[in-house]
Amino acid sequence: MLESELFGHEANAFTGAGPRRKLGLMEVADGSSLFLDEISTMRADLQAKLLRALEERVIRRVGGTKEIGIDIRLITATNKDIMQMISDGDFREDLYYRLNVVEIVMPPLRNRAEDIPALAGSFIKSLLWILVPKLQVYDHEQWKHSLLTTGRVI
């Protein structure tokens, strides 16, 4: 399933594929960026296929024979210790070094509690653009209810 999502498939390439071909995420993202979350969960065969696509800048849809050129920037994330996975043989070292052009380490929030107030403020601000216009729609008479009711409405 993931292979079909990433690389697409030709019509009737497998049971359930359907009568129409499907473009994969890598083909759709041609000329731009593609984000893959939890790259560490990818099967070994797909890791190999992804590595080939990145090195040769071509993909082949599932059930297809034609190579399709791609130009993408791949951004990946994981919450696993990839170096340990490489040591255990669960993640390809060559793929890791192909992907790891720029590494951003994000410590868990539990290790940086001092960031919580700033993050909460940011989340609240991001919701205001949704909330404020909706509040302006309500008739002032509707706000004569109790504070609890007002809180529930909001």
Image: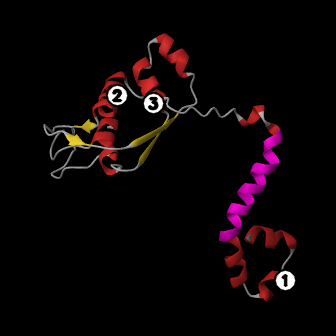
Tag 3 and tag 1, C-beta contact below 8 Å:
no
Mark 3 and mark 1 lie on one chain; the one further toward the N terminus is 3
Residue 37 x, y percent position in the rendering: 49, 38
Question: Looking at the picture, does residue 135 appear above or below residue 37?
Answer: below
Few, some or many C-alpha atoms within 10 Å of disc 1 (few <14, some 14-19, many ≥20)? few
Residue 120 drawn in magenta: yes
Q: Which quadrant is the N terminus positioned in?
A: top left
- Specify the quadrant of the image occupied by residue 112: top right
Residue type at mark 3 is: Leu
Residue 2 image point, x, y percent: 34, 37
Point out the tag, 1 or 2, that comes first from the N-terminus: 2
Q: Position of residue 110 (x, y in %)?
A: 76, 33
Q: Which residue is mark 2?
A: 51
Helix, strand or loop at disc 3?
Answer: helix
Give left or right: position of 52 versus 148: left
Residue drawn at 65 percent across, 34 percent down: 106
Magenta part mainly helix, strand or loop?
Answer: helix
The residue depicted at 80 percent of the width and 72 percent of the height is 149
The dot on residue 87 is none
Q: Is residue 20 above or below residue 94?
A: below
Q: Which residues are magenta?
A: 114-130
Which disc is residue 144 wearing?
Answer: 1
For the C terminus, the quadrant is: bottom right
Where does label 3 land, which residue?
99
* SS of the residue under disc 1: helix
Tell me the CA gap for discs 3 and 2: 9 Å
* Discs 1/2, front: 2
Three-letter residue code for mark 2: Leu
